Image: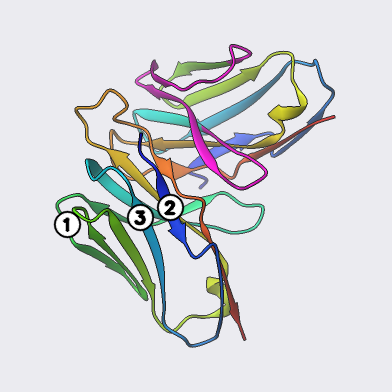
Amino acid sequence: KQEVTQIPAALSVPEGENLVLNCSFTDSAIYNLQWFRQDPGKGLTSLLLIQSSQREQTSGRLNASLDKSSGRSTLYIAASQPGDSATYLCAVRPRLEETSGSRLTFGEGTQLTVNP
Amino acid sequence: DTAVSQTPKYLVTQMGNDKSIKCEQNLGHDTMYWYKQDSKKFLKIMFSYNNKELIINETVPNRFSPKSPDKAHLNLHINSLELGDSAVYFCASSQEVRKQFFGPGTRLTVL
């Protein structure tokens, strides 16, 4: 059974810092990995999706990496801003040949606070 | 335009009642999902439909019944609501196994 862990559970940084959020998963047989952002009381916004064959994806100040063999992904946020404050969730999708091919298994999230 | 929409946004009801949550997506996706986010903010899949067919049904009580009248809609009906059903329910959609897009969530409170 796939388990996804995110460390740290909470992180508070001053504005302008570069930071790294970590995600690890127990079963490396994944199809892709997706990073989401959730603002308080709101839904999830997809940030980046990395296919299992890829090593990283970039979008603006965000860079996500994937090391499938070690079961790890990181989300790097450059020059953090107060508007980045949110909970960041990673989720993995198993390989297609499994019957549960469409499910996402989520980590518990990292709550990020960027202080002005 | 809202890509994935859910109604209602908030739902407060008494134990034992039956309620429904509606979800619609205008992205032309072929797969839709229901997730439950508990008080500890942990998100877990409940159901997944592909082209109106149920393909994932997690260990969810029979009181929960999803219904997909067409590819753009996936509704969740809950019978005999219990206190433990209080949570935020998220609908999502994707085209096959590509990126999933989530709705804003429905916060269900059972009194």
Q: Secondary structure at mark 2?
A: strand
Q: Nearer the viewer, mark 2 or mark 1?
A: 2
* Residue A5 numbered tag: 2
* Residue A24 numbered tag: 3
The chain identifier of the residue carrying mark 3 reads A
First in residue order: circle 3 vs circle 2: 2
| Residue type marked 1 | Gln
Q: Position of residue B37 (x, y in %)?
A: 59, 40
Question: Is residue A36 left or right of B39 when viewed as pictured?
Answer: left
| Residue type marked 3 | Ser
Q: Between B27 and A69, which is closer to the camera in this rendering?
A: A69
Q: Are marks 3 and 1 in contact (CB under 8 Å)?
A: no
Per the rendered image, the range of residues in magenta is B35-64
Q: Position of residue B74 (x, y in %)?
A: 50, 24
* Residue A54 numbered tag: 1
Question: Is residue A100 left or right of A16 when viewed as pictured?
Answer: left
Q: Secondary structure at mark 3?
A: strand
Q: CA distance from mark 3 to mark 2?
A: 5 Å
What residue is rendered at 21% in x and 31% in y? A96
What residue is rendered at 32% in x and 26% in y? A100
The chain identifier of the residue carrying mark 1 reads A
Q: Is residue A27 above or below residue A22?
A: above
Question: Is residue B25 left or right of B88 when viewed as pictured?
Answer: left
Q: CA distance from mark 2 to mark 1?
A: 21 Å
Neighbour tally class for label 1: few under 14, some 14-19, many 20 plus, Cα within 10 Å:
few
Neighbour tally class for label 2: few under 14, some 14-19, many 20 plus, Cα within 10 Å:
many
Q: Position of residue A115 (x, y in %)?
A: 62, 82
Quadrant of the rendered structure where residue A98 is?
top left
